[in-house]
Amino acid sequence: MIAGLLIMADRGCRVLQRQFDRWWIPRDNRRLATRTISIGQLNVAIDRAINWFAVLPGLEFGTITLLKPELDAGMEPKLAFVNHFLGCYASRFDNPELRLFDVKYKTGAEEHRNKQRIGSNHAINDVMFACVNATSETKMGPLFDQLRALEDRGMYGTTHIIWGALVLRHIGAASKADTKSLIQRATPVMIARQEWDRCCDHFAERILFLQWTGQHEKIDPAWIHRLLEGQREDGGWQRHPTLLPTRSIQHTTALALAVLIIMRAHIRDGFDGAFWAGDPA
């Protein structure tokens, strides 16, 4: 009873907070944007986050997907543990998304018959699975319609329109030219929500997708400061702001860590590239 009331109160407070944030966060971002983002700050935050992962018994597949591009790009050798856990995961599970790491991967193939089959657990994942299973012979019109239908004013649907486009590029099912309009349409919607949001899971995700599509110039430095300030004492990040006791989670921590690693490469090395066969939208 008491727990239920606390949850309801927390939800109510977050609704009120979002209304206040529409006014306050843009103003606070202007203050934060005047601060310098130092390599030292980034190094400390990155090392703390990597240490948070070091004590975990395993990685979620989403974490592997988020961190492997930065490892493969040579941006952070300390992420080498990601390859180990990818191998462990692939030996146990038959997941269509493994095609991201081997375009020849075929779910349901004989060599995977003793593995646990991974299916979709969310309507957004239904569309993502359709993207990762696509080929150059797949009719893109209906699939693009499914991606556009995910639009939800800058939340996970919007970010996954971009992710779906990158997946289709990466596996060679659609060209950069064909998917460019999807990214161009989703980007301003994503940024509009980002401009008044607090540090949370989808906050970090929006920044990462701007980085993965090579749109580094559209990232407000204030967002990086807000992400740095959102790091918890244990080195991880929580899913969303809350008044209730909470803990750091893998997905949000992996998102934030990937963002900070790419931002460091951008500041230190002038990196302005993209990932998953993306290019500036």
Image (cartoon, rainbow, N blue to C red):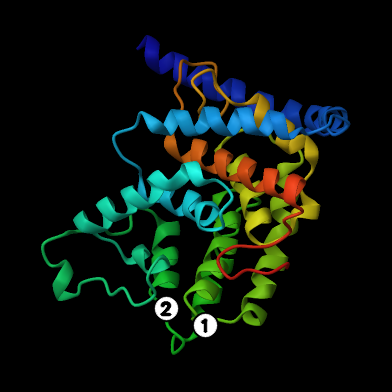
User: Which residue matches tag 2?
Assistant: 134
Residue found farthest to the bottom: 137
Percent position (x, y) of residue 60? 35, 45
User: Which residue matches tag 1?
Assistant: 140
Q: Nearer the viewer, residue 174 or 244?
A: 174
Q: Are marks 2 and 1 in contact (CB under 8 Å)?
A: yes
Q: Amino acid at mark 1?
A: Met
Asked if residue 58 shows in the view, the reply is yes
- The relative height of residue 53 versus residue 151 in the rendered view (above or below) is above
Name the residue rendered at 57%, 45% in the picture: 258
Label 2: how many residues lie within 10 Å, few (<14), some (14-19) or many (20+)?
A: some
- The relative height of residue 152 versus residue 13 in the rendered view (above or below) is below
Say which quadrant the C terminus sits in: bottom right
Marks 2 and 1, Cα distance to the nearest angstrom? 9 Å
- The relative height of residue 249 versus residue 141 in the rendered view (above or below) is above
Name the residue rendered at 75%, 26% in the picture: 20
First-in-chain label (2 vs 1) = 2
**Residue 126 vs residue 32: left or right?**
left
Q: Amino acid at mark 2?
A: Ala
Asked if residue 239 shows in the view, the reply is no
Label 1: how many residues lie within 10 Å, few (<14), some (14-19) or many (20+)?
A: some
Which mark lies nearer to you, 2 or 1? 2
Q: Nearer the viewer, residue 34 or 120?
A: 34
